[in-house]
Amino acid sequence: MNHPQRLKDAIAEDSTTPLIGVFDMFSASLAAQHYDGMFISGFGFAASHYGLPDIGFIAWPDIVAFVQRLRLAFPRQHLLVDIDDGYVDPETACHVVQQLEACGASGVILEDQKRPRRCGHVDGKQVLPLEEYLEKLDLVLQSRRDLVVVARTDATEEPEILRRAEALAATDADVILVDGVRSVEWIRKVRGVIGDKPLLFNQIAGGKSPRLSLPELSELGVDIAIYSTPCLFAAHSAIDKALLELKAAEGRLPEHGPETIGVAESLGLLERNISRHHGPVRAGH
C-alpha cells in the first residue's frame, strides 16, 4: 500500500481532508473509529511521552518508534508526522524522513523555526533565515521517495509571512502551512500567493487561528486541516473530572452502565489493533 500516494489522492479531492491529532496508541485507537487520517502532533507527543511542553524536547528515535507502532495497528490510516525543525541538523532531518518513510508514514511537516522552538500558536517564535531553511527543505525533498512533505513557516510579521509562503510554494514541497494564521482574510492572502500549491490549515483550541468548519475551509481553498490537540485536551478534561468525582465519592467507583466505559468496552477497542484482526477497508468519513 503506497501511503504517501493515498494521502496525495485525498489532498487532490475537492473537499478538505481532516487529520486528527493523536498523542498515544489509545487516543489513536479512538480517532481511528471516526476519521481516516491522523496527525502525529508534536504538542501531544511531547506531553504524552515526556510530560513536557512542545519546545524542542522530542528525540527523533522516539517519534519514529511511535509511528512504527501506529502503522502496524492502523494500516489504512493517513499518518502525517510533525518533525518540528527536523531535529536541528539538516542531515538528521533527512535521516528521520527516510526512517519515517520506511516505516510507513504518509507525510511530514518541516518548519522554519530556530531553537529554542515554540508551539506554532504561542508567542516568542523565531525563524531561520529563509535561505537556510530552503537549503534544509531542499535536502529533505531530495532524500524522500514519495513521502508528502509539508513546508511550514512560523513567520509572524505580515510581509514576511507572504514572502516566505511564496518562496515555499516555488519549491517541490507538496503542501504549504503558515502556522498561527490569525484570520480568514489571511488565509485568503496566503492562498493568493501560493498559486495552485495545496494549503494546510492548523487549528488548536485556545490558539491564534479562527475556529472554522471543514465546509468553510473548503470554500477558502484549504486542502488539509490538522486538529493538533482535540484528543489531548479532551483527555485532560475527562481524566481530571473523573478523578475529582472519585475523590468526592471517597474512592467508590461509579456504577457501570450503558453510557460508561468499562473493561469490556476498552478491550473491544484495543483488540481491533491486533494486526491479524484487521478487516476490510472502511468507507471514508
Image: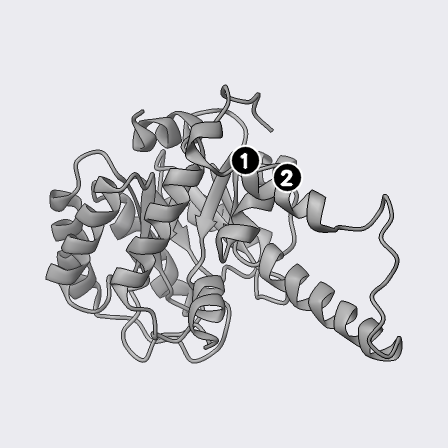
- Secondary structure under the numbered disc 1 in the rendered image: loop
> Which class describes the residues within 10 Å of circle 1: few (<14), some (14-19), or many (20+)?
some
Quarter containing the N terminus: top left
Query: Percent x, y for residue 99?
Result: 20, 49
Residue under the point 12% across and 52% down: 139
- Secondary structure under the numbered disc 2 in the rendered image: helix
Query: Percent x, y for residue 170?
Result: 23, 44
Camera sees residue 212: yes
- Left or right, 146 with respect to 21, comes to left
> Which class describes the residues within 10 Å of circle 2: few (<14), some (14-19), or many (20+)?
few
Query: Percent x, y for residue 107?
Result: 32, 43
Camera sees residue 120: no
Residue under the point 26% across and 42% down: 103
Quarter containing the C terminus: top right
191 vs 208: above or below: above
> Disc 1 and disc 2: Cα gap in Å?
7 Å
Badge 2 is on which residue? 268
Amino acid beneath label 2? Gly
Q: Nearer the viewer, residue 225 or 108?
A: 108
Query: Percent x, y for residue 88?
Result: 21, 69
Amino acid beneath label 1? Arg
161 vs 125: above or below: above
Q: Quadrant of residue 238?
A: bottom right
Indicate which disc residue 81 carries.
none
- Left or right, 118 with respect to 163, comes to right
Q: Nearer the viewer, residue 197 or 28?
A: 28
Circles 1 and 2 in contact, beta carbons < 8 Å: yes
Q: Nearer the viewer, residue 151 or 260?
A: 260
Badge 1 is on which residue? 272
Q: Nearer the viewer, residue 129 or 108?
A: 108
221 vs 242: above or below: above
- Left or right, 78 with respect to 185, comes to left
